[in-house]
Amino acid sequence: MSNISVQEEYAPNSICFGCGPSNKEGLQIESYRIEGGLEMDFVCEEKHQAFPGVINGGILGSLIDCHGNWTAAMAIMDENGWDKPQCTVTAQYEVKLKRPTPFGTKLNLKSRVLGVQKDRAEVIIELKADGKTCATGRGLFVAVKEGHPAYHRWH
């Protein structure tokens, strides 16, 4: 994996709750390029629990959503031969919670691109803890054009 996350490289001033490097109250995920997608590790805090020992599903959804969004942004950038990604937003995503996600262990998320077009990509994400799949996600993420409220959010 690279030394710098895609979030830090391309959107260091982002305030997104899930992936914004400048949101000190957020999750501040760090996703790194791998072949065909991105990978990240994350360690939850006590406040991320739904009940003792188990991570809240909404936190898992945020991890999956933001990691998937960045996977799409990188794929769209590569598909178009751009030097930097255009801001992408979530058009739709789903999360399947397969088993309780334990607190106190490092989570690993790997994503891969199912399909990419000029302005959108479909992505799947797998979230594991202790080598076991705890959740999966699938989403469609779209690059926005000027005039969209999110257009300048990474700059």
Image (cartoon, grey):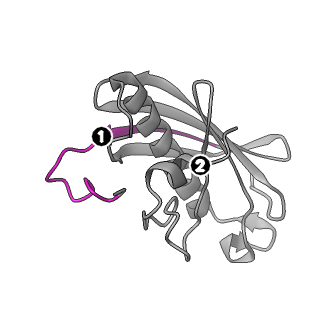
- Label 1 packing within 10 angstroms: few (<14), some (14-19), many (20+): many
Q: Quadrant of the C terminus?
A: bottom left
Residue at point 51%, 58% (across, down): 19
Query: Residue 8: percent from the left, percent from the top?
Result: 53, 55
The label shown at residue 5 is 2
Query: Residue 27: percent from the left, percent from the top?
Result: 59, 65
Query: Residue 138: percent from the left, percent from the top?
Result: 50, 37
Q: Is residue 121 above or below residue 7?
A: above
Q: Quadrant of the N terminus?
A: top right
Residue at point 53%, 46% (across, down): 6
Chain-order first, disc 2 or disc 1? 2
The label shown at residue 10 is none
Q: Is residue 1 above or below residue 47?
A: above
Residue at point 79%, 64% (across, down): 103
Q: Nearer the viewer, residue 12 or 147?
A: 12
What amino acid is labelled 1 in the image?
Ala
Contact? badges 2 and 1 (CB < 8 Å): no
Q: Is residue 55 above or below residue 33?
A: below
Query: Residue 85: percent from the left, percent from the top?
Result: 38, 40
The label shown at residue 143 is 1
What amino acid is labelled 2 in the image?
Ser
Q: Secondary structure at mark 1?
A: strand
Q: Nearer the viewer, residue 60 or 155?
A: 155
Tell me if 84 is positioned left or right of 45 in this view. Answer: left
Segment tinted magenta in the rendering = 136-153
Disc 2/disc 1 C-alpha distance (Å): 20 Å
The mark lying in front, picked from 2 and 1, is 2
